[in-house]
Amino acid sequence: YIVHLVMESTLTARDRVGVQDFVLLENYTSEAAFIENLRRRFGENLIYTYIGSVLVSVNPNKDLEIYSKAHMERYRGVSFYEISPHIYAVSDNTYRAMRTERRDQCILISGESGAGKTEASKKILQYYATTCPVTDHLSTLRDRLLQSNPVLEAFGNAKTLRNDNSSRFGKYMDVQFDFRGAPIGGHILNYLLEKSRVVHQNHGERNFHIFYQLLEGGEQDLLSKLGLERNAQKYQYLVKGCCPRVSSINDKNDWRTVRKALTVIGFHEDEVEDLLNIIASVLHLGNTQFGEGKNGENQITTETQLKYLSKLLGVDGAALREALTHKKITAKGEEMISPLSFEQAVAARDALAKAVYGRAFTWLVVKINQSLAFKGSSSVIGLLDIYGFEVFQHNSFEQFCINYCNEKLHQLFIELTLKSEQEEYEAEGITWEPVKYFDNKIICDLVEGKHKGLISILDEECLRPGEPSDISFLEKLEDTLGGHAHFVTHKLSNGKTRKAVSREEFKLIHYAGEVNYSVNGFLDKNKDLLYRNLKEVICQSNSQVLSQCFHREEVTDQKRPETAATQFKNSLAKLIEILMSKEPSYVRCIKPNDAKQSGRFDEALVRHQVKYLGLMENLRVRRAGFAYRRHYETFLQRYKSLCPGTWPNWQGRLADGVATLVQHLGYKPEEYKLGKTKIFIRFPKTLFSTEDSLEARRPALVLTLQTSWRGYRERAKYLRIRQAVIQSAWRGMISRQKARRRRHAVDIIRKFIKGFIYRHYERCPENEYFLDHQRFSFLMMLFRNPPKSVLDKSWPIPPPCLTEASEHLCRLCMRNMMRAYCRRIQPEWKKQMEQKVVASQIFKDQKDSYPQSVPKLFVASRLNSEEFNLKVIQTLGNDKVKYGIAVTKYDRRGYKARPRQLLLTSSFAMLVAEAKLKQRIDYATLRSISVSSLSDGFMVLHVPSEDNKQKSDVVLQCDHLIEVVTKLATMADKKIKVNMSPDSITFAVARGKEGVIDFTSGPELKVAKCKKGHLLVTAPKLNP
């Protein structure tokens, strides 16, 4: 009973809201079933339905709460069929396909006026602007992309009988994305602006929005400058529709939106000013009136309008007057000026208004493209928002072009749908079954065929000499296309159908139905010409915008311009080429009623749109093979609970899992096929029965899940209780340990405090712990931070009880460090240190240059072996030279400087001049050495005067005085006395005679003989 109830409720829900994919309709060939499904979903505010990958959208004519940021996030990154149909699902699927497949995409939005095409394109742009990654620079671009919509709507949209915001032009927009998927640029192509609306509107319709926005929202100063009044009823181009205000449109607010958008996009103030001048000039043109002059000629009777036109268009007023009332004719190479009749003048005025507005709109699109431009490689998603099939009571040239465009797009739609279906079947290894469908190529050829196509005949009639007219064009159509199955005129029709076609009409049988076209105005609208002298005047304009819209080369160019129909055909061919190069997605928009009322569903109107949108044809193509196809993983994930072999998880290959599942469900071989990655189900009833089984299975699954959840919850509760008991015992143990540690700490603190009080007493129980702690702390401090080197004389202050022990430890420590240091020292370094100690004993705090010599190492000899004279070495015999240095010897008389070599052996020193031994001084006879306390290099070697072998004292100068004296002292075993004199040194010249060397401080070293006969040495003081 429960299973039956669940299944019944599921079927009831399906009957109420319909299927969300038309492919699943059981009676898919029935148009009535198709429309009934639309009606059911529309009644539940489910405005979106799929036909496979095609989205069908019904305009609700009210705001629905399904476009928030939360809804965007819900559809972001989700598989196309996972959740209910939505415009965001198409947007996201297209975006992900562009990123993963690295192929350009496009979304084709079609439907008649009022079906919601413009709103659909806005929702797609908003989705990309909100969900795509963005930076500061990209944020500016995103704003420009979004703000281009209100600008294009203001200049290209108008209120019609069917739609208060109808796009009166076709728009294709490319949105460019970088490698990260962020929008980086855009480009817009516009098609066939309805320029005739500038000068004429049907009853109940309005001109383009921008005129009313300017009059309602423009500042008073701006209107005064433009010569305008805040009253639309005063302008001829705005009163023909008798509908200046619309309840659903707030022109004042829209004006502020447009002005802000122009700033965001990057328009300069002077460009905006020129653009508004053009808008105002169109209104003044509409109010320009003509009348008969004194001589019967046609002339302008509204001078105020002419004055404003001259100012706003930036042209000469007299030239403009002449161009509006006369035309220039060239015959046999001669130019003639011919006056215009009243009708011709009005036509010329209207042609100028349409040309100026139409080219200004094209310039506007170019400027927007410049602000969105990105140069470089990128991926692209195209959005095509173009007029749907139109059938009015009176159909003219514009409807002909629009319906031709829809024929081409329908042809592309069917071809690409069939192609994508066939490619999917082939990719999955499923046999493709050919599908019969109506091929509208015969209608496209009827319109665009060479020589015999309707457009070719129209162009030929426009260009032929003589007096071509709309009626002659119709006659030529009858002569050329008579007998074509899809072309009918009053003359060619039989008695039954003749009444349905007037004598000035021709009928085309389109794929979407029959349409009667009135030929009146076909030739003029196709020519779309402006009188040459009018074009010359506008080309001389000093307006920045008009100078870019009307090029002066146009006046001199003798080449005949392309007709409007040919231009449209060529641009349409380029559009088809663009769309063919991209992977398409489709949005088909349907208008539920003509009254723009929410909740009202007009079946007759909807049936008409379903027909001309080709939805039944598309459904038939899609259902020609299999109604439902899904990836194995998705199918298995959804239905695995229906088979014990696949529940709860399938561990093998996905294809094997699906095969096991469908075998358990009892699928017949003709009901399904297994492809490489997907399962294909032929009949919707098979899927519905599976879905119903899933609904029946769900209560058992819910019960299982509830049981598992309750078990899990109770076990978790038990574990929490058990953990709480363990935690309680653990916390008790921890608390007891903490209490024991606290008691122990209190005892220690008490002993410490009592010991500190008794610290100066003899050792006793009261201070025993404190003294032991002091001893231990001191010894540990020594252990952790002993002196690091022999030069480190620091030693911690010991407690009183360890004073004697500290002294012993200090001596032992220093002795150990000295012993370790001595063991590590090298023999060469030891010798160096010994010499440095001798130098310190002699010169420390005595000689000015001593501190600079301390870091400099003493060398074994300052002379190389090559510098020793061989004869001198031979003379020495067994006495080897221990040290040698170049010195300067000063004579005792006259103090003449002579270069010498001072050579030290183990027992004597000697002065050598080249190969001669000049003087030998035994260390035993050397009494002393005298040096000054300054930084000079002078020294006097004092020898005994009574020694006949010696020549008296020796005065020497060298660069390394401290090193030489240290070497001499070391050789003589430190028995030589070194005298340090701050002012002068007295030395023996000869027996009984003495010489004096005076020393003084100065900036640099100088040696000179003074007047007293003394030797004066000036030396710089290095340590003041």
Image: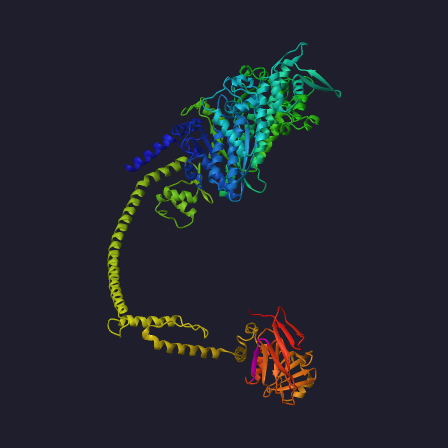
Q: Looking at the image, can residue 145 be seen? A: yes
Left or right: residue 949 versus residue 102 is right
What is the quadrant of residue 635 in the picture?
Answer: top left
Left or right: residue 862 versus residue 238 is right
Q: How is the image coloured?
A: rainbow
| Above or below, 378 relative to 882 | above
Residue that appears at 31% across and 36% down = 6
| Above or below, 322 relative to 721 | above
Where in the figure is residue 424, as x and y percent of width and height?
Answer: 50, 40
Q: How many marks?
A: 0
Where in the figure is residue 601, as x and y percent of width and height?
Answer: 42, 24
Left or right: residue 890 versus residue 386 is right
Q: Residue furthest front?
A: 1012
Which quadrant of the rendered structure holds the C terminus?
Answer: bottom right
Q: Nearer the viewer, residue 195 or 99?
A: 195
| Above or below, 803 relative to 384 | below
| Above or below, 403 relative to 722 | above
Q: Nearer the viewer, residue 253 or 72?
A: 253
What secondary structure prevails in the magenta region? strand
Where in the figure is residue 186, as x and y percent of width and height?
Answer: 55, 37
What is the quadrant of residue 492 in the picture?
Answer: top right
Which quadrant of the rendered structure holds the N terminus?
Answer: top left
Q: Nearer the viewer, residue 557 or 1010?
A: 1010
Q: Is residue 506 magenta?
A: no
Q: Looking at the image, can residue 624 be seen? A: no
Segment colored magenta = 976-983
Where in the figure is residue 396, as x and y percent of width and height?
Answer: 57, 20
Q: Nearer the viewer, residue 373 or 1008?
A: 1008
Residue that appears at 26% across and 74% down = 763
